[in-house]
Every structure is written in C-alpha cells, then in structure tokens.
Amino acid sequence: MFTNHSQPQPDETGAFMSPNRTRDITDAIYAFALTLLVVTIDIPKFGQLSTSEEFNLHLWAIMPQILVYALSFLLLAIFWITNHKEYNLLKRVDSRLLWLNFLSLIFVIFIPFTTDLMGEYPRFQSAGIIFDANILFLGLTYYAIWTYAEKRKLFSTNLSPVVRRELRRRLMIVPILALVAIILSFFVPLYSNLVCLSAPVIMWIIDAKYDKELKEAESGEKT
C-alpha cells in the first residue's frame, strides 16, 4: 500500500543516495534491540516453595517486569512499522537524513536498557521517566526525519495528501502518549506507563480511517 516503486535517481555529486542500505541497517538494529529485550528477561528463582499460592504470589510480584517488556516490544514494533512506511516512500536520502536516522537508532538501542531499568525498579518515578523520555525522543526524531525529508523533497513526487496526513498522525501518537505518561508519573508513578498500551488501538483506528480516506480520494480522482 505504501511501497514506492520508483527507482532512486542517480546523483553524480554523491549528495544523494538510495535509501536501501539505510533501511537495511535500520532493520538490523531493530532486530538486535528486539532480541536484547528477550535475552535480558531473567527466569525468576523463587527458592523453596511449598504451595502453589506462594508461587502465584511471587509470580504476581514480577508482573510489572513482564508488562514493561511486553510494552517495549509493542512500541518497538510500532516504530519499526512507521520507519518501514517512511523509507518505502523515500526515493533518495542525503547525509543529513542519514545522521538523523542514526540519531533515532541511538534511542532504539537504548530501549532494552531503559526497559530493564523500569522492570527492575517499577516503583521509582525516575526509572519510568527515563523510559518514557527514551520513547519520546525516539518519536521526535522520526518526526524530524519526516519534516526534513518533506522540506528537501526526498519523498516520491506522487505522494498524496492522504498519505502525508496519515504518516504525520502516526508519528505524533507515541510521543504524545509518552509525554502524557511522564506527566502522570508525578501522580501515579507505578501505573503511568500503562497509557502507552493504547498506542496499538489508536494506530488501528488511524489506519482504518486512512483506508477510508484513501478510497474516497481514489474514487474522487476517477470521477
């Protein structure tokens, strides 16, 4: 649906290049970050347990850690899908866009660390703020990439206004939710990050609205 089939324009000056290699290294970093999320999950050692009730109590105690890992996986998946859509629409990249992309990857690779930090210390507000700030800055770098690419006309020339609106909406969802979570952490630090669980639902609503708008735009062009 979002794939750009146009070939990158050759550039004799070397100022522009194909987005393919940038997309490949980005996919590799995301795969590495997602793998780190899994391998850093420790199997709990509860010691000597005599009843299933004792086991359940210990298991319930580590539920915040399980939830934060699940949340991080969902957020990374959302960011990867957004990145995939952005780079499928790019016809070329320049050196500044490459540096913006590497800046975003710094925040991607920090997610396993901030996840582990918040999973270990869920009751401390600072741990939650560090996690949310990581998500916030990652989202803002993607918005910066989109804004810069639009300004430099690096996207496909036939990019419709419907697609532009859909991606702008997508890019602002997670940063806004992360900012809300930071504010809520001053009141309910243990549960503030749960607001980010609504991100997949909001994405689904936006995608459904986008499909409707795209069909209406296509039918309008035909008439």
Image: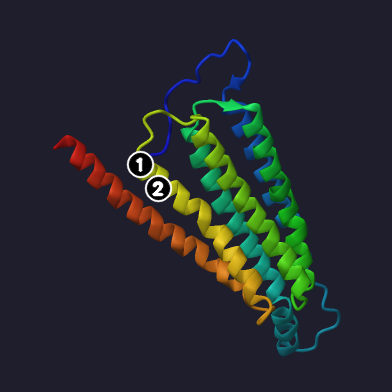
Residue drawn at the location 46% of the way across and 20% of the way down:
7
| Three-letter code, disc 2 | Arg
x and y percentages locating residue 134 in the rendered image = 70, 57
Residue 56 appears left or right of 169: right
x and y percentages locating residue 220 in the rendered image = 19, 41
Residue drawn at the location 43% of the way across and 23% of the way down:
6
Disc 2: which residue: 165
Front-lying residue, 20 or 160: 160
Asked whether disc 2 touches disc 1, contact meaning CB atoms under 8 Å apart, the reply is yes
| Three-letter code, disc 1 | Pro
Count residues near mark 1 (Cα–Cα under 10 Å), then give few for <14, some for 14-19, many for 20+. Answer: few
Determine whether 60 is above or below 204 in the image.
below
Q: Residue furthest front?
A: 151
Q: Which secondary structure, mark 1?
A: helix
Q: Which mark is residue 213?
A: none
- Res. 209 image quadrant: bottom left
Q: Quadrant of the N terminus?
A: top left
Front-lying residue, 48 or 216: 216
Residue drawn at the location 56% of the way across and 47% of the way down:
143
Q: Which secondary structure, mark 2?
A: helix
x and y percentages locating residue 39 in the rendered image = 76, 55
Disc 1: which residue: 161
x and y percentages locating residue 48 in the rendered image = 85, 82
Q: Residue furthest right?
A: 47
Picture mark count:
2
Determine whether 199 is above or below 35 in the image.
below
Q: Residue furthest left?
A: 223
